[in-house]
């Protein structure tokens, strides 16, 4: 009889420990998922802010840069290509292409002394450059959150529970080589 009680007690301890382990792991993954979602929301807000500022910059320089309309057209095209409804890798490719087009626009503006000294153009340039820096910082935080989550769901015991709870890897906010080549911008042709 004492052996039966000891075995039942040992089984109960193992069951409680297993339950605690499942509970703790589940809560940790939920917290990591929420962190990713919050980080993505921060990236998305900044992308939308840049989306809203680009038309102002294009309007401010459009009249002066008459013969370099291809630069403005490309910035506008990429601005219009932004969509928060597409998967993260596609948003990353669009964001990278937009950043390159904006850098090309800034380089082109340098060729126009009257634009370089225009207060509104300088203010818009500074704001977009600030937003580009914020996007880079928030992208890094998002990717760090994704790395932590992806690593954790591949570790024991989470890997044993991943199928049960539907945990799968998340995409990084990064541009693949194929996307980078597909979205390459050549603004010198026009």
Image: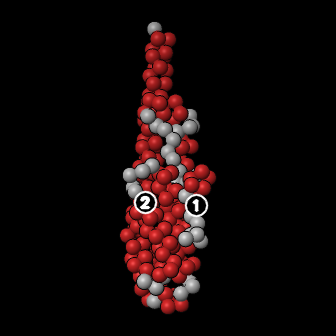
Within-10-Å neighbours for mark 2: few <14, some 14–19, many 20+: some
Label whose residue precedes the other's in the sequence (2 or 1): 2
| Percent of width and height locating residue 58 | 43, 76
Q: Is residue 183 above or below residue 23?
A: below
Q: Is residue 134 above or below residue 173?
A: below
When asked about the image quadrant of residue 175, the answer is bottom right
Q: CA distance from mark 2 to mark 1?
A: 14 Å
Q: Identify the mark at residue 81; answer none if there is no mark.
A: 2
Question: Nearest the camera: 125 or 57?
Answer: 57
Q: How is the image coloured?
A: secondary structure
When asked about the image quadrant of residue 107, the answer is bottom right
State the SS at label 1. Answer: loop
Q: Residue at x 42, y 51 (%)?
A: 86
State the count of labels.
2
Q: Is residue 54 above or below residue 66?
A: above
Q: Is residue 69 visible?
A: yes
The residue under label 1 is: 184
């Amino acid at each position: 009889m004492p052996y039966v009680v000891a075995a039942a007690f040992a089984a109960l301890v193992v069951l409680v420990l297993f339950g605690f382990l499942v509970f703790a792991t589940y809560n940790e993954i939920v917290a990591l998922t929420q962190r990713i979602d919050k980080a993505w929301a921060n990236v998305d807000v900044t992308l939308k802010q840049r989306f809203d500022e680009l038309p102002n910059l294009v309007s401010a320089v459009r009249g002066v840069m008459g013969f370099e309309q291809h630069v403005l057209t490309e910035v506008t095209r990429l601005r219009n290509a932004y969509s928060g409804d597409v998967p993260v890798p596609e948003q990353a490719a669009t964001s990278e292409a937009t950043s390159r087009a904006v850098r090309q626009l800034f380089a082109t503006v340098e060729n126009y002394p009257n634009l370089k000294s225009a207060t509104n153009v300088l203010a818009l340039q500074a704001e977009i450059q600030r937003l580009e820096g914020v996007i880079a910082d928030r992208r890094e935080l998002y990717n760090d959150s994704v790395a932590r989550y992806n690593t954790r769901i591949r570790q024991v015991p989470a890997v044993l529970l991943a199928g049960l709870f539907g945990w799968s890897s998340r995409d990084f906010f990064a541009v693949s080589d194929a996307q980078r080549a597909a979205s390459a911008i050549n603004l010198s042709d026009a």
